Image (cartoon, helix red, strand yellow):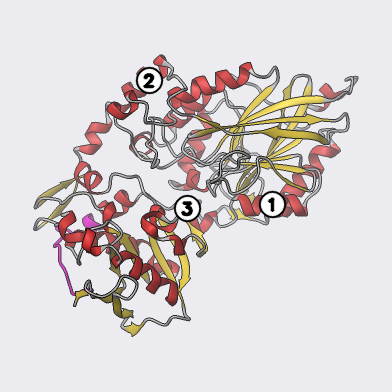
Amino acid sequence: MKRFLTATAALALTAGMAQADYSLTILHTNDFHARFEPISKYDGPCSAEDNTAGECFGGTARLVNAIKDAKARTNNYILVDGGDQFQGSLFYTYYKGKMAAEMMNMLGYDGMTVGNHEFDDGPEVLAGFMDALEFPILMSNADISAEPLLAGKLAKSAVIERGGELIGLIGLTSEDTDELASPGENVIFTDSVAAVQGEVDLLTARGVNKIIVLSHSGYKVDQMVAENTTGVDVIVGGHSNTLLSNTNDRAEGAYPTMVKETAIVQAYAYGKYLGELNVTFDDEGNVKEASGEPVLIDAAVVEDEGTVARIAELAQPLDEIRNKVVAETSEMIDGDRAVCRVMECPMGNLIADAMLARVADQGVQIAVQNSGGIRSSIDAGEVTMGEVLSVLPFQNTLSTFQVSGATILEALENGASQIEEVAGRFLQVSGMTYSVDAKAEAGSRISDVMVGGEPLDPAKVYGVVSNNYVRNGGDGFAMFKTADNAYDYGPDLADVTAEFIAANGAYTPYVDGRITLK
């Protein structure tokens, strides 16, 4: 069992210590989302054949050796996580937090923050996860005193000892977690800046002068927190799945991003990278130097055989889920690509309706689903989870965002721009109707767009739900990348669809003229 200290208990270690420059390597992950098995370049499942061919990334078995290699490059390190270990694969569906706890303990983490998805199944599952962990999980910006499962158990901060020095860790969670997950009415989220500064002040008053915030709040919030607090040395981020790098041209910022005296890092998501930040502190605990780069965990990193075997063992019961009957349909639900990529189709209606129903209470009016994400049909009769996963195999998550009517029209034009090529960008919709003239020039094929029975207003802002692939610019939907109030990490689209089919007895597929061909 790893040991960590409360800030009060740590005081005794400070007496009589010689002070000098102190170097620490911070190894970090974030937004792992139960990707224990290797992932494809699209962040979805990667077949055994592709893995053997060297085309896969990540997976816990590679992470074992990536961490081992990183440790060999330093004599003083910690390993921390920026939250959202939960949700994203059948491993979480089946094991909830148990498998994540086993793997994180095996990897030797020193601390993590609570991500919003850690609340997806309420405080009870989070509490069980915490019971299994051998390191602290933290959250400073919430009042949990009224939640008996967490009160007195989920700390705001902790102190660990490493290389003869004390390091303060503070947890920070997205302030809108109550809207994104299911923390329950007893957990009240509070202001991030005030929460962090309060813990910094407590830690520094107790003699801890090296402070790391483990934040599941997003890159922009992390920069805001750094700007408006004092005493924070490093922020290890998460939530926005941001790649920071000094060498990758797809990076959103430098690694680390410096805001005043604070070094901010984040390492994308899904175990594809291991963050490696080298920090030198002066004898007063100030950052003198911070440098590093996320390490890509590709096929060059050998998988640990013992971990491969253990994950294969844990994967065996997942076949039961794949064979589990989750719903019933009175007729075949047509998801044929030759249909769905050029016109309204029953599977497209089902998926778009399911998305919209899931978030309609959030002020969302429109759902759009790229037809390329629809991979098969479902036969009449019983519907298994395996069948749903064959239709929606990519582990895409629901994304909600806001854009103008003009942007929606631009997206519809993009969807129809390659209809003659039967391209996957063609949009299936819910909450709206539109017409397509495939004979017109690309960029001028859409007309008669109606939302909620009213003509589309180019100047009006609409709430939209899609999948994270489309929202982030996949299939040419670059116009969504700059959407307002975007959140890309909702529930898995396959789960949402399965639950929708099952909601009202046998499902009857249909088309209703929401897309008209001219």
Q: Amino acid at mark 1?
A: Gln
Q: x and y percent of residue 494 in the render?
A: 30, 49
The main secondary structure of the magenta stretch is loop
- Res. 181 mark: 3
- Identify residue type, mark 3: Ala
Mark before the other along the chain sequence, 3 or 1: 3
The answer to which of 13 and 214 lies nearer the viewer is: 214
Picture quarter with the N terminus: top right
Q: Earlier in the sequence, mark 1 or mark 2?
A: 1
Residue 339 image offset from top left, x and y in percent = 16, 60
Magenta residue span:
499-515
Instruction: Say which element carries label 1.
Output: helix
Location of residue 311 by image quarter: top left
Name the secondary structure under disc 3: loop
From the image, tell me which residue sits under label 1: 223
Can the viewer see residue 28 in this picture?
Answer: yes
Residue at screen point 61% across, 50% down: 219
Q: Position of residue 344 (x, y in %)?
A: 20, 67
- Of all residues, the one furthest to the bottom in this rendering is 454
Q: CA distance from mark 1 to mark 2?
A: 38 Å
Q: State the separation of the CA atoms marked 2 and 3.
A: 31 Å
Taking the image as shown, residue 398 lies to the left or right of residue 497, namely right
Mark 1 closeness class: few <14, some 14–19, many ≥20 residues within 10 Å = some
**Type of residue at label 2?**
Val
Q: Give residue 308's mark.
A: 2
Which numbered mark, 2 or 3, is in the foreground of this view? 2
Q: Is residue 135 above or below residue 405?
A: above
Q: Residue at x 20, y 75 (%)?
A: 516
The structure residue drawn at horizontal position 31% and vertical position 59%, both measured from the top left corner, is 425
